[in-house]
Image (cartoon, rainbow, N blue to C red):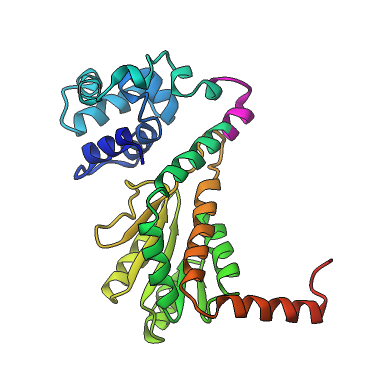
């Protein structure tokens, strides 16, 4: 993580932000180098919110208004000129302003992946998560609504190396029953994929998991997501917001990184993979 991003995260910590304000905060972290130079209108456009929402966001942080927030960011930057001069959306990444809306959406996802790569410069959180997930028997994997594909993909591959993976991708009255069954079976940790819009059921399920003593590892779109809890290990991976429906390349990739970290902690992971390949060949599962 860059020093500019770290300063912004520290500024936002401890504030109870609305979903719209979390969206602005997330956008500023992604654009940390340019944030001190963006006007309220430019920031609103980048975050996909209204200009008054940016003003309310600044006030929620304790500033008189957005100009005061921007002035604070400029004064706290160690080398303002190194961050660029800021000339609208182009200053937030020249490629972002080029091309049509589809190209811009792709470029935004590239930026999300770059930000994820920067976060992974410190592998300790992912390695800790890998140890927690590998040790849990069974391993419940939670993901509802928009997060269901991420949870299902993780569970599919995790089952190849982990002896007992249990997918929780449907809400309703059965969700708590299935979670309780995992606890009774000896689960020690839960992996949650939480993406916007965040279902209330996800928040409730995570609360139940904590009450049961499970260690919670959460892949969320932002450190300010409503599922965030100080006792959890939260790993942020931004979603793209340039299209009508969010795109989730970074959360998907982070899920694969967690799979790698978990497999590294399972001594028989390679043997399980080789056994699966042998059975697949015997059954003729794949066109090879």
Tell me which segment is drawn in magenta: 97-106
Tell which of 125 and 26 is nearer to you.
Answer: 125
For the point 74% across and 81% down, the residue is: 279
Residue 195 drawn above or below residue 98: below
Quadrant position of the N terminus in the picture: top left
Location of residue 251 in the rendering, given as x and y in whole percent from the top left corner: 50, 51
| Furthest residue in direction bottom, as rendered | 185
On the image, which quarter does residue 88 sit in?
A: top left
Quadrant position of the C terminus in the picture: bottom right
Observer able to see residue 235: yes
Q: Is residue 149 left or right of residue 265?
A: right
Tell which of 207 and 288 is nearer to you.
Answer: 288
On the image, which quarter does residue 18 sit in?
A: top left
On the image, which quarter does residue 118 sit in?
A: top left
The overriding secondary structure of the stretch rendered in magenta is helix
For the point 64% across and 75% down, the residue is: 273
Is 100 colored magenta in this rendering?
yes
Tell which of 145 and 276 is nearer to you.
Answer: 276
Location of residue 283 in the rendering, given as x and y in whole percent from the top left corner: 80, 80
Tell which of 277 and 238 is nearer to you.
Answer: 277
Residue 12 drawn above or below residue 274: above
Is 104 colored magenta in this rendering?
yes
Q: Is residue 123 left or right of residue 14?
A: right
């Amino acid at each position: 993580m860059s020093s500019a991003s770290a300063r912004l995260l520290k500024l936002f910590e401890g504030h109870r932000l609305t979903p719209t304000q979390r969206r602005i905060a997330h956008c500023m972290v992604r654009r940390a180098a340019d944030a001190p130079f963006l006007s309220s209108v430019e920031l609103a456009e980048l975050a996909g919110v209204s200009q008054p929402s940016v003003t309310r966001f600044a006030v929620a942080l304790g500033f008189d208004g957005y100009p005061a927030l921007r002035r604070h960011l400029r004064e706290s930057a160690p080398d303002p000129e190194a961050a660029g001069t800021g000339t609208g959306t182009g200053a937030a990444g020249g490629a972002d302003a080029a091309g049509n809306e589809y190209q811009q959406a792709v470029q935004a996802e590239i930026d999300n992946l770059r930000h994820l790569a920067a976060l992974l410069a410190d592998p300790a959180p992912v390695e800790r998560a890998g140890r927690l997930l590998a040790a849990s028997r069974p391993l419940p994997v939670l993901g509802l609504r928009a997060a269901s594909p991420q949870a299902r993909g993780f569970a599919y591959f995790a089952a190849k190396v982990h002896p007992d993976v249990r997918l929780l991708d449907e809400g309703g009255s059965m969700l708590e029953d299935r979670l309780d069954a995992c606890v009774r079976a000896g689960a020690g940790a839960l992996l949650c994929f939480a993406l916007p819009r965040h279902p209330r059921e996800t928040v409730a399920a995570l609360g139940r998991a904590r009450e049961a003593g499970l260690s919670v590892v959460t892949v969320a779109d932002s450190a300010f997501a409503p599922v965030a809890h100080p006792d959890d290990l939260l790993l942020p991976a931004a979603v793209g917001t340039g299209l009508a429906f969010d795109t989730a390349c970074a959360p998907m990739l982070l899920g694969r990184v967690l799979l790698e970290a978990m497999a590294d902690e399972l001594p028989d992971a390679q043997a399980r993979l080789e056994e699966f390949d042998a059975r697949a060949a015997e059954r003729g599962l794949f066109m090879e």
